[in-house]
Amino acid sequence: MAKGKSVSAAVEDRVEEIARRLTAGSELEVVDVEFVKEHEQYLRVFIDKESGIGIDDCQALSEKLDEELDREDCVPGAYILEVSSPGLDRVLRKDRDYVREAGKAVEISLYEPIDGEKTIVGKLVGLSEDGSQLLLEGETPETGRSIERKKIARVRLYIEI
């Protein structure tokens, strides 16, 4: 395990690596992996593809991944494996998520209000070159907005109802 990395983060990284290998050459994209303790331990793998995810996609990857995880024994203890779509209002976590979803509306939840707002909705431009700020589109490039990532609790795709 990498120095300073939690067990959950190490498991997520290794499982993501395995899932990416299993989906290489297919239409499937591994969007995220989550290893969490709720009442039990859950290992969640979120996948997507251009035409949308179906139950058959989830089942096929789940079976392959289950075999590979048993063989590699890289997840400590008992766990429940779930393979699913991240949903329309998926949470953006990694730099590649911000690149992939650029041009879409996002809802940003902040740790503390900025200009009296704790939730901001805007069109995602992407990240600053150094990745430290989230960039939102404005009426003009000059009126765009940047928000420091350390101030952001969560970013998810915004679905207008």
Image: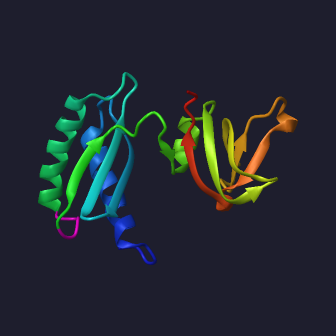
Q: Is residue 47 magenta?
A: no
Seen in the image, is 110 located left or right of residue 33? right
Residue at position x 80%, y 38% from top? 144
Residue at position x 51%, y 51% from top? 93
Q: In which image quadrant can residue 58 be found? A: top left
Magenta residues (range): 73-77
Q: Quadrant of the C terminus?
A: top right
Colour logic: rainbow
What x and y, as percent, mark residue 3?
A: 43, 78
Seen in the image, is 41 located left or right of residue 120? left
What x and y, as percent, mark residue 42?
A: 27, 58
User: Furthest residue to the right?
Assistant: 142
Q: Main secondary structure of the magenta part?
A: loop
Residue at position x 68%, y 56% from top? 132
Circle count:
0
Q: Is residue 50 above or below residue 88?
A: above
Q: In which image quadrant can residue 61 be found? A: top left
Nearest to the observer: residue 36 or residue 127: 36
Residue at position x 49%, y 46% from top? 91
What x and y, as percent, mark residue 39?
A: 26, 65
Seen in the image, is 81 located left or right of residue 24? left
Seen in the image, is 82 located left or right of residue 110? left
Q: Quadrant of the N terminus?
A: bottom left
User: Furthest residue to the top?
Assistant: 51
Q: Is residue 59 above or below residue 133?
A: above
